Amino acid sequence: MRVKSIVSAAVLAATFSCSTTFAAAPTTSEVITTYADIALATYEDALTGARDLQASIDALLQHPDASTLEQARAAWKAARVPYQQSEAYRFGNPIVDDWEGRVNSWPLDEGLIDYVDSTHYGDASDENTQYRANVIANTTLRVGGTQIDATDITPELLANTLHEIDGIEANVATGYHAIEFLLWGQDLNGTAPGAGNRPASDYSLENCTGGHCDRRRDYLQAATQLLIADLQEMVDNWKDQGAARQQLLKKDDNAAIATILTGMGSLAYGELAGERTKLGLMLHDPEEEHDCFSDNTHWSHYYDAKGIRNVYQGSYTRIDGSTVEGPGLSAYVAAQAAAADESMQAKLQATEAAAQAMVDRAVQGETFDVLIGVGNTTGNQLVQNFVDALTEETRAIEEIIGQLKLDQVQLEGSDSLDNPAQVLE
């Protein structure tokens, strides 16, 4: 990972230190204000990252070569850092949940977008008629009895027509992962080392490879413009008069605290431990890897876990090194159930250590898809350690929920954790 995508040791130490101590137990209003302020700062940083990505993509399209392609890839990885930390705001906040699919849907059937290698991808899907639609190569699509005009590849076409076309969730046409595929191409290495290797010439008008380079350029630009617009929408939602902040402030005390814990616990357990980690490990399937084209999954998991800690401790370190902090949930819990808070702090540290172990192994060449490979006993155990740490973290969250008597909280589950036999059928 390039320098822009790596947080310095000093920043990490500050971020993962114990929560800030405030003189008195915070009120619910103070906790909610801190929570919303961190949301705003995190989405603002994600928006800044997307704009930096757009500048790098503009440079790539102006001079398509190995250097500008690598810079665009580095900018994509850097843009993921703040966004992944925002995912603790999912599940409890309907406005975020309804929006999230536009920016971070996965896995995607990439044959909808561009050319693919048939030996690895196949020619058709019984479930998805648009499995090999290849919008970049084709100006029309047929869905049922309707013909769709895709002559002009615009943000509107991607968002309003192509995304989840035909009601298929795997028809992901927008967001980070569509852009990731366009920058890296397919990862054809299975569980062996190596990411996607799309050539820069796929964007050259003079020496085009892959065909239809003009339309591929249009698609990459449209997807990036749309990502910026979507992130701006979420920034606006968390401003003082924004819909997400106002929706939260209108809740009673218990419901507001329940919202925070729902997001933390559902991300930790059902989503991150289950769908994004355990499922791929059970199946030894790199197609279940979150950032499967770039092999950036270890960092995405790391920053997802970090986002949970940010929310709990009421502190977020911005991409410019400044800190947004205030009375957090930790202080609120400690005032009512000190032992539960201490347990939660310990579980957060254990999760950090397990995530760091995967990052360290990735630096040595064993990225997530390699770690989950059949026969990689040590790698499999590192991934399982992360799942176990997140599961224990969730138990600490459930203990907090019980101590605070928040009976209305329902955390997301995952078949890979709750009913593994069904997954393997």
Image (spheres, rainbow, N blue to C red):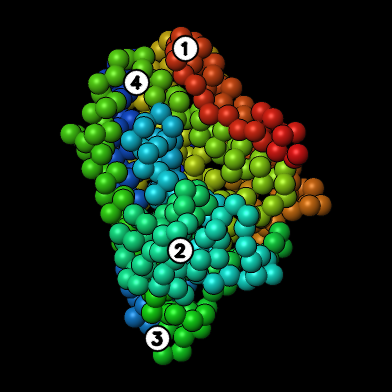
Residue 407: mark: 1
From the viewer's perspective, is 309 left or right of 423?
left
Secondary element under disc 2, as helix, strand or loop, is strand
Q: Give the mark, 3 or 4, whose residue is nearer the N terminus.
A: 3
- The amino acid sitting under disc 1 is Asp
Q: Give the mark, 1 or 2, whose residue is nearer the N terminus.
A: 2
x, y percentage for residue 421? 75, 33
Q: Give the mark, 1 or 3, whose residue is nearer the N terminus.
A: 3
Q: Give the mark, 2 or 4, whose residue is nearer the N terminus.
A: 2
From the viewer's perspective, is 343 left or right of 99?
right
Residue 142: mark: 2
Residue that mark 3 sits on: 205
Residue that mark 4 sits on: 256
Using the image, determine if residue 275 lies above or below residue 47: above
Using the image, determine if residue 177 lies above or below residue 91: below
- Where the C terminus falls, by quadrant? top right
- The amino acid sitting under disc 3 is Leu
Distance between the Cα atoms at labels 3 and 2?
28 Å
Asked whether the residues under the numbered discs 3 and 2 touch, taking CB atoms below 8 Å apart as contact, a structural biologist would say: no
Distance between the Cα atoms at labels 1 and 2?
48 Å
Q: Give the mark, 4 or 1, whose residue is nearer the N terminus.
A: 4
Q: Which mark is in front, 3 or 4?
A: 3
Distance between the Cα atoms at labels 3 and 4?
53 Å
Q: Residue at x 31, y 65 (%)?
A: 154
Is residue 122 visible in this depiction of the protein?
yes
Question: Residue 195 lies in what quarter of the image?
Answer: bottom right
Question: Residue 214 lies in what quarter of the image?
Answer: bottom left
Around disc 4, counting alpha carbons within 10 Å, would you say few (fewer than 14), some (14 to 19), or many (20 or more)? many
- The amino acid sitting under disc 4 is Ala
Distance between the Cα atoms at labels 4 and 1?
13 Å
